[in-house]
Image (cartoon, rainbow, N blue to C red):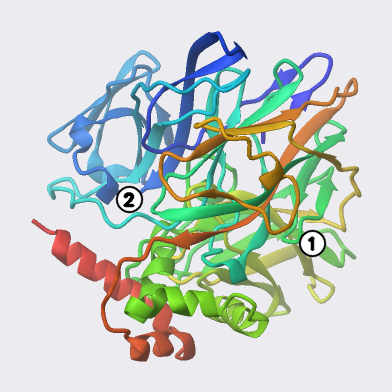
Amino acid sequence: MAKILAQPVKVMSGNSKSRHGAAILVALASACLIAGCMVNKTIRLSVANVPSPENERIVGLTTQRGEDVTFDHRGTAVNQGIVNGIVQGKPYDIALSDVQRLWVERRGVSTARTIGLVAAVGGAAIIAAVAVHEANKPPPPPPPPAQSCPFVYSWDGSQYVFDAEPYGGAITRGLERDDYSELTHLRARGGQYRLLLTNEVDETQNTNLLELWTVDHAPGTRIVADENGVLHGFPQVQELSSATDRYGNDLLPWLRATDRKIWEPSAIAGPDGSLRQEVILTFPKPEGVTQANLLANAATGLWGSYMIKRMAELHGRDTAKWLASLDGNPAGVESIHAWGEREGTYRLPIEVDESGVWQTRGALPNGGPYVAQDRAIALDVTHVTGQLLRIRLRPPVGFWAFNSFAVAYGKGDAVTVNRVAATSARTARGKDVLADLASIDDRYYSMPDNDDRAEIVFPALPLKPRMERTVFLHSRGWYQLHLRDQSEPDLVTFNRILTVPGAAVGFAVDGFAEYRRTAAP
């Protein structure tokens, strides 16, 4: 987790998160001076999103055993199912069949329009995390894109870095919601923070509010938001002692730290035919504690994100009408949320082991799919006996991606939050949208096209000596899917998904299998 430390300034860079795009030019000092400026985004994608890995610039990989490998030089090659590169000055070869993810960099150049003192920029540079294909099987063509939300890039002093993906799943105004995203890459320069807001998905994005929340705190304290936007300070955090899946596989290498090792089961039935995985997390527990906060870094899986649109489109030509029916319909919205938690698709129950009986004590909210955010989920552990805390998650396959889990005992420390309003917000076409983003009201900054983007500038308040700063983006909005399906509604299937336990994951697994069949050479 990146922090800003006063006297001296301490910068600990995290993993950039990026997708396809281009380098850009941005005016930093004045309307007359334009300097080279890079946009950098890292996302995780299945191998289907990289049809020709041999043509990619591979910068690193994650092995099936959970090893994180970074190559010395870019341009590492894939030849006949083997990745060839240089690691710490020595040749490194590995079969694609032994690789869990490739980290691929794509870059290009474009020109941004100058706006006042800074430019609202376009394009992006991408590092894609991709799961590898079988060594002797040609990769299939790209699948439908995951449904997402706005992409937020933070200026880190030299480039814009993909840092947040707010209000995922808010696919109609009735589902509009607030989001609280830690900006791990944001750095103050010249007394200012800069963000870039872009639309890079097939949808119209409507943002109601953007503001920064800053917390200055003692070094070593971890600041985490809960689902309702309450920020908590945790001076002591307990790491995982063990983690296993349904089949006894060791998940500790994947789940003990927020890094490039992401556990994301594909939408495929397990060896025993189960459509649900099972993750058992174990932590040491002090005597007498009654509350634990599960600190989860997780996101909606890529296929699960695509299923948002696919399931909605079962209404065929009436999809837009059905989505609009949720606006101003709290009961309908609540039923959607209840379904998501019951099925574990877009809200995952958290169970605690109480003397051999699993009891639901919380729920993991959805997010992403490209940026996993930390969330603190309070759990009642009054009835947990012994010196171990065991937590169980039962995610349906294809719907979740887990990066890390930790626990903090107690309620956490209260923190002082400074809310920082933007001083400038201009689009790539020079339009001032500051008032659209200033407060929660009926005004929105709407982005209907993929070349829509805006740069937002905030003042950076001085940091007190010997303090660290954690910065969050508080945002609110919703997005409208671009719907083109004019088919007959399939309400039988839709109603079955809503009413029959397990039907949603079955639908997703069938869809994934169909994709693989049609993509096969």
Is the N terminus in the top left, top right, bottom left or bottom right quadrant? top right
Q: Determine whether the residue tagged by mark 1 lies in a helix, strand or loop.
A: strand
At 61% across and 20% down in the image, what residue appears? 116
Q: Residue at x 62, y 56 (%)?
A: 477
- Camera-nearest residue between 285 and 413: 413
Residue 277 image label: none
Q: What amino acid type should be assigned to the residue bearing mark 1?
A: Ala
Left or right of residue 230, residue 312 in this image: left
Pointer 2 residue: 46
CA neighbours of label 2 inside 10 A, class few (<14), some (14 to 19), many (20+): many
Residue at image coords 58%, 65%:
280
Q: Give the number of callouts.
A: 2
SS at mark 2 in the image: loop
Tags 1 and 2 in contact by the CB under 8 Å rule? no
| Place of residue 203 in the rendered image (x, y in percent of width and height, measured from the top left) | 43, 55
Name the residue carrying label 1: 292
**Is 472 on the left-hand or right-hand side of 132?**
right
